[in-house]
Image (cartoon, rainbow, N blue to C red):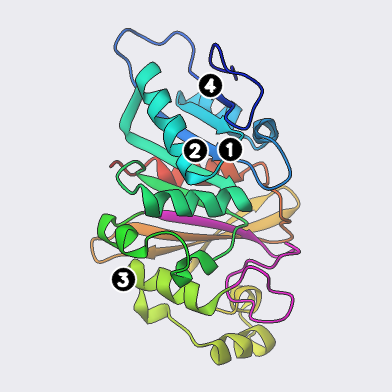
Amino acid sequence: MVRPEGAQDSAQDYYVYVPVNAAEGEQFPLVIVNHGANVNARVCESFGWIELAGADRFMLAMAENTQPEALHQMLQAIKANYPVDSSRVYMTGTSQGGRYSKQFAGLYPDEVAAIAPMNASFSFLNGEDGDIEALREKGMPMLFVAGTADVYNPLPLRNNANALMGSVQGWNNLLQLHGQEEYQITAEESEQLLETSLNLLEHYTGVRLPEAKVYNAVNNRTFQCDFVNAQGVATLSLVIEENGSHEPLGHDAELAWRFMKQFTR
């Protein structure tokens, strides 16, 4: 990762990775990776994206200031100075960085082709921040990652005193955004599933989900539930990591990239 020439130590700093030996005129997809609260951009180097970008030849950008307006300014500067395929810009982030990824997509839906928030609140879809209508009009593909051992309980309707990031309304709005109303649920139904369901995923999440793909990652199972639209495309995916904490796991980047790279804007 390199910092652009002339950049100073400030909240505006950002770091860019470009594949080596680029051919003349070659353009690359760009993944913007946002850090969480109370850490800096360099922590994102440990999330698995560097190795993946090297293997699959795409660009990365990691900013200190991950608020949407600052990210938009950074993106315009990168597109002006680096060989970015503007139709294949993606955004991901963990915790606060995931929230800002969702906000960015709502404010600037023409700029990104897909997003992958990790360990982040569903409450942004309550309509309090971000433009839901813009996301709906653009059909924004989204992959969400949440762990069952996350102390902030983002999975997605944990409707109790410890659920700092769950939201019944946000989850239902998300389903409606993607045309998946058949999976909507009430708070009462969610509580019942959490307490009594013998289905493992219903017990973990408090929601009804499509059949999951199961990955046996190191020390935990990972379940991926794809919500498929009428055209047979999964524009919404929920990844549930057994024993996953609030920090990204090593395979998160691979799952997010596998999902996002399917889409162009």
Residue type marked 1: Asn
- The quarter of the picture where the N terminus appears is top right
Verify whether residue 124 appears in magenta.
no
Return the x and y of residue 172 as percentages of the image width and height. 44, 76
The first of marks 3 and 2 along the sequence is 2
Q: Residue visible at 47% across and 62% down?
A: 129
Q: Are marks 1 and 3 in contact (CB under 8 Å)?
A: no
Residue under pointer 3? 179
Label 1 and label 2: CA atoms lie apart by 6 Å
Q: Are marks 4 and 1 in contact (CB under 8 Å)?
A: no
Residue under pointer 2? 70
Q: Residue visible at 35% across and 73% down?
A: 176
Q: Main secondary structure of the magenta part?
A: loop
Image disc number at residue 17: 4
Residue under pointer 1? 65
Q: Residues within 10 Å of mark 3 (few under 14, many from 20)?
A: some
The first of marks 1 and 2 along the sequence is 1
Q: In the rendered image, is residue 44 in sight?
A: yes
Q: Residues within 10 Å of mark 4 (few under 14, many from 20)?
A: some
Q: Nearer the viewer, residue 54 or 72?
A: 72
The first of marks 4 and 2 along the sequence is 4
Residue type marked 2: Ala
Label 3 and label 2: CA atoms lie apart by 31 Å
Q: Which residues are magenta?
A: 141-166
Label 3 and label 4: CA atoms lie apart by 36 Å
